Amino acid sequence: MGRRGLALVVAGPSCVGKGALIQNLLRSCPEVELSISVTTRKPRPGERDGVDYHFISVAEFERMREAGELFEWARVHEAYYYGTPVAGVREAIEAGRTRVFELDYQGAGSLREKLGSDAVLVFVLPPSFAELQRRQRQRHTEQPDEMAVRLRTAVKELSHTNLFDYLVLNDDLEQASQELQAILQAERTRGSRAGYEGLIAELLAETRRVIG
Ligand code: 5GP
């Protein structure tokens, strides 16, 4: 039996730095695959279709949902639909690979439900409310009413932290990135997925043979 892969879910309030943490993880661990979600939200300046998201219409989203092409989906920010394409999710885990998902708390719950312990759930916390607001204002891409919606979504996110396996405080991005990488490394060596059954059997057999 080989090594088993895992689905690493990163969630947390809007602008807490999930994207930057994931980008750092992909740089440090180039073997990690990124799940690119579909969304009905319009692209922000600088966002690229097929890189940040697959930007699709509501009609296309509904078609994908009905056709069973989404592993999970959720309505986020009281407005838009987001979904994880089903393609390759289970295959990646079976093949021993790591796939990272940036999801809201609903998506994290769905992955836990569908994948059990193959899903590792990480929630990213800001160091304070003031800092979260500062990061949200810095993004400058939302109108004030949209900011209010994002704060209401943040309340929902923060009310579901008990669902998660790990909490990472993103005060210093470098330190938080190291913590996320450490979580991944530790999870890869978890007994049930490390894939050392063959080695252990061989060690046992040899040891028994020698002691007679
Ligand atoms: P945005 O990109 O609009 O700033 O934030 C979208 C929110 O929806 C974030 O909290 C993000 O983690 C979440 N999200 C993005 N893609 C998906 C997805 O495929 N499924 C779910 N459930 N949530 C997603």
Image (cartoon, helix red, strand yellow):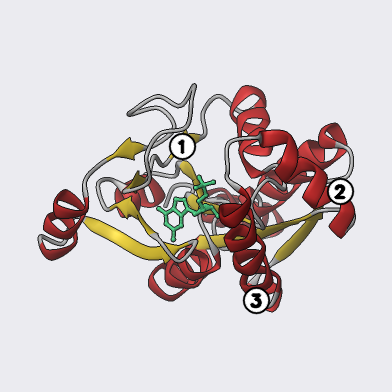
Q: Nearer the viewer, mark 2 or mark 3?
A: 2
Q: Is residue 208 visible?
A: no
Label 2 sits on residue: 131
Q: CA distance from mark 3 to mark 1?
A: 24 Å
The circle drawn on residue 160 is 3
Quadrant where the C terminus lies? bottom right
Q: Left or right: where does residue 183 sit relative to residue 76?
A: right
Image side of residue 179 versus residue 1, left or right: right
Q: Please report contact status of discs 1 and 2: CB closer than 8 Å, yes or no.
A: no
Tell me which amino acid carries mark 3: His
Q: Nearer the viewer, mark 3 or mark 1?
A: 3
Q: Secondary structure at mark 2?
A: helix
Circles 2, 3 touching at the beta carbon (< 8 Å): no
178, above or below 108, in the image:
above
**Residue sitting at 71 percent across and 70 percent down?**
158
**What is the C-alpha distance between the residues marked 2 and 3?**
20 Å
Judging by the rendered image, the residue that carries numbered circle 1 is: 34
Residue type pointed to by label 2: Glu
Q: Tell me if mark 1 has few (under 14), some (14-19) or many (20+) residues whose alpha carbon lies within 10 angstroms of its own.
A: some
Q: Are marks 3 and 1 in contact (CB under 8 Å)?
A: no
Q: Tell me the SS state at disc 3.
A: loop
Label 2 CB sits under 8 Å from any ligand 1 atom: no
